[in-house]
Image (cartoon, helix red, strand yellow):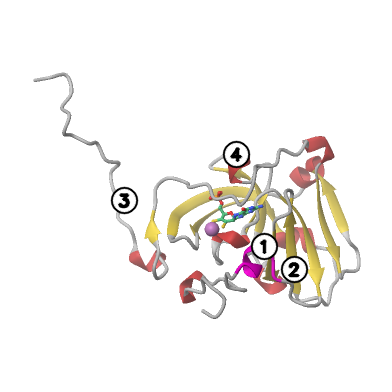
């Protein structure tokens, strides 16, 4: 017997995938791909802040320390990228958008999410409320890696993953819907993976 056999490729054990968790046209990955439209920003945490602003009464802003002092939630969700990979059972920790919107009054129905590096994405406010979205800083119990959006990213798992802005810095409430970076480039304005809303017109 040679010490190792060349033809043998060890594969990770394939977990049984529940097909009802995989949206149409998606396939399941075990790794965590990185998709970024530009370089990875490296903000200094002592200069970092997160704001809720725009068409609101009671605009609010938190420093890094203040954000971390808010009530934290740890949750496990599936994520779906429009390039067709789905990652099941990802565990995150962060602050619910409901917590961030506490004490903010608005009649605006849209949010323009903005991030370091200039990325923006638009989401209806109701899609960020009622336990549907978080600002997360921890993945699998570890600080979120810069490539995956650290120090903090938005997480909106029920929409395609481009809505989950990495390096997020704020939510601007808008009265009119304002398409963001990918939405202006032909991707769907809403992005529901279960209705396969990939491109404008889907
Ligand atoms: N700021 C910022 N956020 C972003 C992106 C980006 O380019 N810049 N890409 C989006 C897209 S298209 C996807 S699929 C996910 C990728 O996140 P990941 O690199 O952690 O997998 O981030 C989304 N959020
Ligand atoms: Mo994506």
Q: Residue at x 62, y 62 (%)?
A: 163
Task: Give the image quadrant in which the ligand numbered 2 is located.
Answer: bottom right
Single out the residue that lies furthest toward the bottom: 201
Within 10 angstroms of label 2, few (less than 14), some, or many (20 or more) residues?
A: many
Give x and y (percent) for residue 74.
59, 50
Which mark's residue is nearer the viewer, 1 or 3? Answer: 1
Which one is nearer the viewer's eye here, 42 or 182? 182
Within 10 angstroms of label 1, few (less than 14), some, or many (20 or more) residues?
A: some
Q: Which residue is mark 4?
A: 145
Please determine whether, in this image, residue 152 is positioned above or below residue 109: above
Distance from the alpha carbon under mark 3 to that under mark 2: 37 Å
Single out the residue that lies furthest toward the front: 185
Mark found first going from the N terminus, 2 or 4? 2
The N terminus - image quarter: top left
Mark 1 lies on a secondary structure that is: helix
Q: Which residue is mark 1?
A: 181
**What span is colored magenta in the figure?**
179-185
Q: Which residue is mark 3?
A: 15
Which mark's residue is nearer the viewer, 3 or 2? Answer: 2
Distance from the alpha carbon under mark 2 to that under mark 4: 25 Å
Please determine whether, in this image, residue 50 is positioned above or below residue 160: above
Mark 4 lies on a secondary structure that is: loop
Label 4 close to label 3 by CB (< 8 Å): no
Give x and y (percent) for residue 103.
85, 64
Distance from the alpha carbon under mark 1 to that under mark 2: 14 Å
Q: Which residue is mark 2?
A: 111
Mark found first going from the N terminus, 1 or 3? 3
- Specify whether residue 153 is in view: yes
Give x and y (percent) for residue 36.
59, 50
Give x and y (percent) for residue 117.
72, 49
Label 2 close to label 4 by CB (< 8 Å): no
Which mark's residue is nearer the viewer, 1 or 4? Answer: 1
């Amino acid at each position: 017997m040679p010490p190792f056999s060349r033809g043998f490729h060890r594969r990770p054990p394939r977990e049984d995938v529940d097909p009802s968790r995989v949206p149409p046209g998606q396939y399941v990955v075990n790794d965590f791909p990185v998709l970024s439209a530009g370089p990875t920003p490296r903000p200094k945490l002592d200069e970092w802040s997160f704001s809720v602003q725009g068409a609101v009464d009671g605009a609010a802003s938190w420093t890094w320390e203040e954000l971390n002092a808010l009530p934290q939630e740890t949750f496990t969700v599936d994520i779906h990228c429009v390039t067709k990979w789905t990652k099941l059972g990802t565990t995150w920790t962060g602050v619910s958008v409901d917590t961030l919107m506490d004490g903010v009054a608005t009649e605006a129905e849209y949010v323009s999410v903005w991030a370091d590096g200039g990325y923006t994405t638009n989401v209806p406010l109701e899609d960020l409320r009622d336990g549907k979205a978080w600002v997360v800083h921890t993945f699998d119990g570890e600080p979120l890696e810069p490539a995956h959006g650290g120090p903090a990213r938005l997480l909106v798992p029920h929409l395609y993953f481009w809505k989950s802005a990495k390096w997020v810095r704020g939510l601007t409430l808008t009265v009119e819907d304002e398409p963001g970076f990918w939405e202006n480039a032909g991707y769907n304005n809403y992005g529901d993976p279960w209705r396969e809303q990939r491109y404008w017109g889907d």
